[in-house]
Image: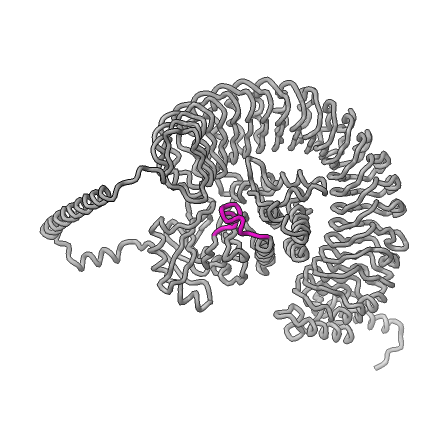
């Protein structure tokens, strides 16, 4: 039927519109693509050739419902956005096919393993007028930057975290609409490109972590729309061009870690929208422009050669939040007036002077971090500093401060780090210090403090490090020092302490230093439980008597200093990895120098022992027979009663089962045999912060690790055995050669036992810092770095949910061979609840030296935190140094010594770097990766997949 009236046509159109709204706008599932686009998408899905592809026409015929596919909602329904991020793609041959979809606005291929992009892709997709965004970040692209012809609508191009190299000249000049360009973490070299879209509408320019050289181009100031410039971590020289001051829309300018010089241009102070300016780790000289902070929120000019005084109005603007001028050559006083909005102020390692009492601390209610160390400040610590109640870190170390410690420090209840060492402070340690109950680091060493150690120190229950050495403290160590359950380091040397040495915190790990005091008498047995301790210094006291055997049984001990005491007798036999300093004890003899026993005497002694043992056995046998007769006569316990009692007794093992599907492990693992092994401490081969490892040799002859988890703290959220087993079954189904995967488990009332493949070489820490460290050449260290990176990338990329590590360190990495590492303790994140810990999260989440700085304040374990810990492991492999040495964290030492690129060689292990120029270049390339991993800013750290690629690319 044909309708001719206008009203009827209007009615028909209305009906069509209603039908469309019902079927297409509300339930988009009913929307269908054109047959052409549907065919393209189906062909692409076949071309992808990946298992369990989320693009599957058989399972879901409506392409618009596929993962990562976005369709529009107009009458001409079509694909506008495709995201194949994280699809595991390695073959890029399918890319040109997508260019047949001319409605595309966004293409995202990030987080894959693509090594190249076909030239046909650029030729075909360049003609799509609406294509605005192209993302190939986090792949493995190599070669030079391709030339982008046409692409008239392209606004955003992201090729970050790849291996692209070569110069950038005119490849991007034709992009008339380009607004965002991200090329960070590649290997581009040559000059910083200045032809970036012929319309010069660029807004965001990110070129950090490349190898660009030369100066910042003068004509960068002609890109008037720029809001972000990041040129950090290159090799740029020269000055900041004055033309940058013309960028009136600029909000962020990052020039860190280059070799730029000259003065900071005054023109920057005229950019009213500039919020962040970071130019740290360069060679800037001259004075600070007085008005540069007028509009800024964050300023970082640390590690330069800036001179002069800090302008009086410099810290006053109300918008200012963080200022870092540390490691420069500034002199004069701190400005008296400081903005109440300031959150962080770092002025350490300058030549600043004068009293800090002139600062109006009472108004700084938002200040969280105050770092004034390594200057020449004088006077007393002002009592007003107690008004800064948000302070989490206070560092006044290495100045010339005098007077006493103000009791008002006890008001800083949010304080976690207090460093006052190397000053001229005197008087008592105030008892109010015990009010700092979340303090993790307290260092008041090398002052002139007297009086006794206040017993209230035990209230600082989250202390990790307590350093009081180099004072004039008297009296005895408080008995309640053992209540510091999370203390890892205790430095009490160079004082006048005496009396009884009480029981020490059992988690002491880094060092216990009691040297140069007035202790006397025998070495106390209160030290016998310190099985985690690495360094014990008892030197320069008046200890006497024999060296007790229990010192030789401290399983983690690496250095024992007994020098200059009155010890005598024979020194016990210590393990080979323990270094013992016994000098200054003239009557103390090594074990091998004990007087020899003659053959005749040895026979006589042996005969005596045999006769004695025989008599003892006979006596025991007679007593046993008598006891058996009496017990049968009076108790008459029959076999049936005994068997009944055994059935009713609670079993030790609640549950046990295999997790692995591997037939070899299934046939080898004997749970009953393993339970016999763990009954003997002699089978312990390794201890970590949360676990004890036993070596179990099965009846088949195969060896396995059996790891015991002790449910001794509320942090273990066991909840129910069923829940724990479910978590273990998930972990048991994982497969990666660089990860310790649980093979079986046994649950008891108070413990859990997990079975793993045996790693005969022990931990990376023991090899790298023990007697076998010289066996680790660069090839081995590089293989270990790659293996650990592969394991961590695998854990972070688990499809169900990322597996994070609470304690990634060289102690939690075991070696099957000198080139085969395995990352351990993967189950801890599933079974530990840090919020229930009696200590801070930083105590639970990592070992000292590996803990990322933000953990102390965010109270959250993250991927970025794991990256930081891995960076420290890389530094251990590169330097040969432990994560903490003589109280200094390796990461901080490397950062402070990496300011000058010409000094990087001095960071690396000399015994390794000297082997060849090729090795040196590879180590420097990996050092670049490590420094990126230990960035103070979590956001600046690369993802683990990118870290792995960069390490692989270093060779």
The quarter of the rendered structure image containing the N terminus is bottom right
Q: Residue at x 86, y 78 (%)?
A: 3
Boundaries of the magenta span: 762-777
Expressed as whole percent of the image width and height from the top left, the position of residue 213 reads: 80, 48
Q: How many marks?
A: 0
Q: Quadrant of residue 498?
A: top left
Instruction: Find residue 407 and report its horizontal and vertical position in percent.
Output: 56, 21
Task: Please state which of residues 870 and 174 is positioned toward the viewer in this rendering.
Answer: 870
Determine whether, in the image, residue 748 is placed left or right of residue 768: left
Residue 800 in sight here: yes
Question: Magenta includes 771?
Answer: yes
Percent of width and height locating residue 708? 41, 51
Left or right of 670 in this view: 2: right
Q: Position of residue 648 (x, y in %)?
A: 26, 56
In the figure, 888 relative to 828: above or below?
above
Tell me if I can see residue 77 in this picture: no
Residue at the image position 79 percent from the left and 49 percent from the top: 212
Q: Quadrant of the C terminus?
A: bottom right
């Amino acid at each position: 039927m044909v309708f001719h009236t206008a009203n009827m046509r209007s009615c028909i159109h209305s009906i069509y519109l209603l039908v469309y709204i019902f079927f297409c706008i509300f339930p988009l599932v009913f929307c269908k693509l054109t047959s052409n686009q549907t065919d393209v998408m189906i062909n692409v899905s076949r071309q992808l050739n990946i298992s369990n592809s989320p693009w599957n026409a058989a399972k879901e015929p409506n392409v618009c419902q596929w993962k990562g596919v976005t369709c529009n909602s107009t009458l001409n329904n079509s694909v506008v956005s495709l995201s194949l991020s994280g699809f595991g793609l390695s073959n890029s041959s399918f890319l040109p096919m997508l260019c047949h979809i001319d409605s595309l606005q966004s293409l995202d291929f990030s987080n894959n393993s693509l090594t190249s992009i076909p030239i046909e892709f650029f030729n075909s997709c360049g003609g799509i007028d609406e294509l605005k965004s192209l993302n190939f970040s986090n792949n493995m692209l190599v070669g030079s930057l391709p030339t982008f012809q046409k692409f008239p609508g392209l606004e955003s191009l992201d090729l970050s975290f790849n291996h692209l190299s070569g110069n950038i000249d005119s490849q991007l000049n034709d992009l008339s609409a380009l607004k965002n360009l991200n090329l960070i973490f590649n290997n581009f070299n040559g000059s910083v490109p200045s032809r970036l879209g012929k319309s010069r509408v660029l807004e965001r320019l990110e070129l950090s972590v490349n190898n660009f050289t030369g100066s910042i181009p003068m004509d960068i100031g002609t890109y008037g729309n720029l809001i972000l410039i990041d040129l950090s971590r290159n090799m740029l020289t020269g000055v900041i061009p004055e033309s940058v001051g013309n960028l009136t829309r600029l909000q962020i300018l990052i020039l860190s870690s280059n070799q730029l010089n000259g003065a900071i241009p005054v023109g920057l102070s005229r950019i009213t929208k500039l919020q962040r300016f970071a130019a740290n780790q360069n060679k800037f000289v001259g004075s600070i422009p007085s008005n540069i902070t007028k509009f800024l929120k964050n300023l970082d000019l640390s590690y330069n050669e800036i001179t002069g005084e800090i302008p009086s109005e410099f810290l006053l603007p109300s918008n200012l939040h963080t200022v870092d001028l540390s490691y420069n050559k500034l002199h004069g006083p701190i400005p008296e007036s400081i903005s109440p909005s300031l959150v962080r102020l770092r002025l350490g390692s300058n030549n600043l002077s004068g009293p800090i009492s002139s600062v109006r601390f009472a108004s700084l209610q938002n200040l969280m971090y105050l770092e004034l160390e390594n200057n020449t400040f004088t006077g007393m610590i002002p009592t007003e500093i107690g008004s800064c109640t948000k302070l989490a870190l206070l560092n006044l170390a290495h100045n010339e401060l005098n007077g006493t410690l103000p009791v008002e420090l006890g008001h800083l209840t949010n304080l976690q780090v207090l460093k006052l060492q190397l000053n001229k402070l005197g008087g008592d340690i105030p008892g109010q210090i015990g009010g700092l109950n979340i303090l993790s680091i307290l260092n008041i060493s090398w002052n002139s403090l007297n009086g006794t150690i206040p017993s209230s120190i035990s209230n600082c229950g989250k202390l990790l490090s307590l350093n009081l050495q180099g004072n004039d403290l008297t009296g005895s160590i408080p008995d309640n020092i053992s209540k510091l359950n999370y203390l890892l380091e205790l430095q009490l040397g160079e004082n006048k302490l005496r009396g009884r040495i009480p029981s020490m915190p059992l988690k002491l790990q880094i060092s216990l230093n009691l040297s140069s005091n007035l202790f006397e008498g025998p070495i106390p047995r209160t030290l016998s439980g310190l099985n985690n301790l690495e360094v014990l210094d008892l030197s320069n006291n008046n200890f006497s008597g024999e060296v007790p055997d229990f010192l030789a049984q401290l399983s983690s001990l690496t250095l024992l200093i007994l020098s200059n005491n009155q010890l005598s007798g024979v020194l016990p036999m210590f393990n080979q990895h323990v270094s013992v300093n016994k000098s200054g004890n003239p009557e103390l003899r090594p074990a091998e120098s004990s007087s020899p026993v003659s053959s005749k005497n040895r026979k006589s002694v042996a005969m005596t022992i045999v006769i004695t043992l025989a008599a003892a056995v006979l006596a025991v046998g007679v007593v046993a027979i008598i006891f058996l007769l009496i017990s049968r006569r009076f108790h008459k316990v029959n076999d049936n009663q005994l068997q009944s009692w055994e059935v009713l007794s609670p079993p030790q093992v609640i549950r046990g089962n295999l997790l692995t599907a591997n037939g070899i492990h299934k046939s080898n693992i004997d749970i009953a045999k393993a339970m016999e092994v763990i009954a003997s401490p002699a089978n312990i081969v390794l201890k970590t912060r949360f676990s004890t490892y036993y070596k179990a040799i099965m009846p088949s002859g195969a060896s396995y690790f059996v790891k015991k988890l002790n449910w001794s703290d509320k942090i273990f959220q066991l909840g129910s055995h069923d829940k724990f087993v479910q978590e273990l079954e998930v972990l048991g189904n994982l497969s990666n050669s660089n990860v310790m995967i649980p093979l079986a488990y046994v649950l008891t009332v108070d413990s859990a036992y997990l079975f793993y493949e045996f790693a005969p070489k022990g931990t990376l820490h023991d090899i790298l810092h023990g007697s076998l460290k010289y066996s680790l050449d660069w090839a081995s260290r590089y293989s270990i770095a790659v293996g650990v990176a592969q394991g961590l990338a695998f854990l972070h990329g688990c499809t169900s949910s990322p597996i994070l590590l609470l304690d990634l360190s060289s102690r939690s990495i075991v070696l099957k061979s000198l080139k085969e590492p395995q990352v351990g303790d993967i189950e801890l994140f599933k079974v530990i609840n840090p919020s229930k810990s009696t200590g801070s999260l930083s105590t639970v989440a990592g070992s000292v030296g590996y803990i990322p700085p933000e953990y102390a304040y965010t109270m959250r374990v993250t991927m970025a935190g794991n990256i930081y810990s891995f960076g420290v492991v890389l530094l251990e492999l590169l330097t040969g140094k432990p994560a903490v040495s003589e109280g200094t964290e390796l990461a901080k030492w490397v950062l402070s010594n990496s300011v000058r690129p010409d000094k990087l060689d001095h960071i690396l292990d000399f015994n390794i770097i000297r082997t060849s120029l090729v090795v040196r270049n590879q180590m420097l390339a990996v050092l670049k990766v490590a420094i990126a991993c230990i960035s103070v800013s979590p956001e600046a750290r690369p993802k683990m997949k990118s870290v792995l690629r960069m390490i692989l690319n270093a060779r």
